[in-house]
Image: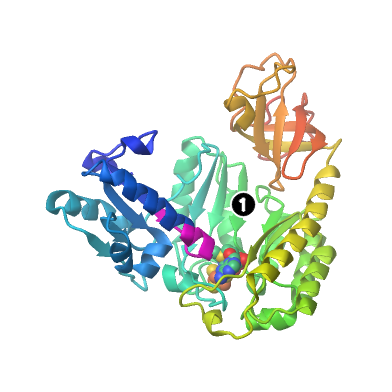
Amino acid sequence: MRLALLGYEQTASMDRADLIIINTCSVRAKAEQKAFSLLGRLARMKRNKRGLIIGVGGCVAQQEGEKILGRMPSVDLVFGTQAIDRLPRLIQQIETRRCRLVDVEMDEIAGIPEFLNGRRTESQVSKFVTVMRGCDNYCAYCVVPFVRGRETSREPESIIREIRVLVENGVKEVTLLGQNVNSYGKKQGLCSFPELLARIDEIEGLLRIRFTTSHPKDLSPGLITAFGDLEKLCPHIHLPVQSGSNRILKRMNRKYTIEQYLDKVAKLRDTCSNIAITSDMIVGFPGETEADFEKTLELIKTVEYDGLFAFQYSDRPSAPSVKLPHKISEPIKRERLQTLLALQEKFTKSKNKALVGSTQWVLTDGLSKKQASGQADAANPALQWTGRTPSNKIVNFYLDGHPDAKHSLTGQIIGVRIDKAFSHSLFGKAIGAELPAGGLKGVENYAA
Ligand code: SAM
Ligand code: SF4
């Protein structure tokens, strides 16, 4: 991080910090409330530590700007979503002039700084790579186009350069990020998203590619075909539908119907029979009736999602839906959310259960949480590891009496026999992997 040039280094505990930066999200009201309550706690901390500099970045900073300085006297810096590049200069100004600053300038054609990414997870094996930012879709409930600006794609060469550097440093899997990867490159006349995927697929040493998010209206035949053609593209798609009712989808400005959505789901499954499909749902959008909600439940039963992220609708500043009539009460939203989650839980569990007895190819991320925190099963002395299947399911596993049991499995793809299924993870045992005839291209197998 370039703040190191100013002499800053990471501390393990917040109490020891001289500079604290809060990165905020304003997509849902809850995330914003959490950011302000953390700032409240930091204000109390600052009373005992005068020199402490507190900065607020991200979408809430972009949305609220100067208002944050008024509401939070302990905050020294508010910087918007496109000011990250300017952060070292802003901090330097605060250090020398002891002033309070706001920088929420947005540039319609701002590029995406190279090597900004890839450090967002703890994992050294799997990294996120931003391929585009902003959004031009204006879904009625969403604040993203207002706080992240217009959609801009990053040059393919810059993306490929970044991934090559990550791979040289031991990364095996990348997740390409964008609000709607399907429109990647269109505006600037760059290559298409499937073409970008094909180029990334060729990077030697990279084992897996994932991406998120894909807007159903733009899910192209080319991207569906990529799931059949590209060796490293994992069989998982996150395809947010938001509602099962055409009436609500129209009010949401989503620009597709449930029939069109289901047609794309069928084509994905025709191309890649084992593809895992996950989605986002909003309950209690203004005007959502019981009948609309029932249609959402019906859709969940029809698609049988592998997993769902479901949210209660909340009004967001600038989002057009703020002005819509017939707001749904909090208790009804809560009840609908619980009903929906209970239904989905059955499908998630049964999908996981169906994998018991199968062998899954797990890209090992490191020791399991239990092992790392010293809480592993004392009756089983073997080390416990964790990783994900190609379909993105978490697997905790152990390696029983293997001669190399003490060697690190981190970053390796291991064949694991699944013995148990839970709601959000699987458990199994590493097997002396026998690769399918001819092997799995691109698979670096531990026991092979
Ligand atoms: N670009 C992605 C897409 O089109 O699906 C999603 C981006 S948004 C950051 C992530 C999710 O937050 C959305 O899919 C939606 O389900 C949820 N969300 C966005 N605005 C919301 C709101 N006002 N209230 C509740 N949930 C919201
Ligand atoms: Fe928000 Fe819609 Fe853009 Fe997704 S596609 S970021 S939901 S406006």
Give the residue number, with chain letter if any, for mark 1. Answer: 210
Quarter containing the N terminus: top left
In the image, is the residue at mark 1 within 8 Å of ligand 1 by its beta carbon?
A: no
Q: Quadrant of ligand 2?
A: bottom right
Q: Residue at x 70, y 16 (%)?
A: 381
Quarter containing the C terminus: top right
- Residue 111 visible in the shown view: no
Magenta-span inclusion, residue 285: no
Q: In the figure, 226 relative to 317: above or below?
A: above
Q: Estimate the x, y position of residue 422 in percent, counting from the top left.
A: 77, 41
Q: Farthest residue to the left: give it.
A: 97
- Out of 311 and 42, give the one closest to the viewer: 42
Q: Which residues are magenta?
A: 23-33
Q: Is residue 135 left or right of residue 45?
A: right
Q: Estimate the x, y position of residue 431 in percent, counting from the top left.
A: 78, 26
Q: In the figure, 157 relative to 120: above or below?
A: below
The answer to which quarter of the image holds residue 78 is: bottom left
The answer to which quarter of the image holds residue 325 is: bottom right
- Residue 160 visible in the shown view: yes
Q: In the figure, 24 relative to 14: above or below?
A: below
Q: Residue at x 66, y 21 (%)?
A: 383
Q: In the figure, 425 relative to 32: above or below?
A: above
Q: Estimate the x, y position of residue 177 in percent, counting from the top left.
A: 53, 57
Q: Estimate the x, y position of residue 192 in percent, counting from the top left.
A: 56, 66
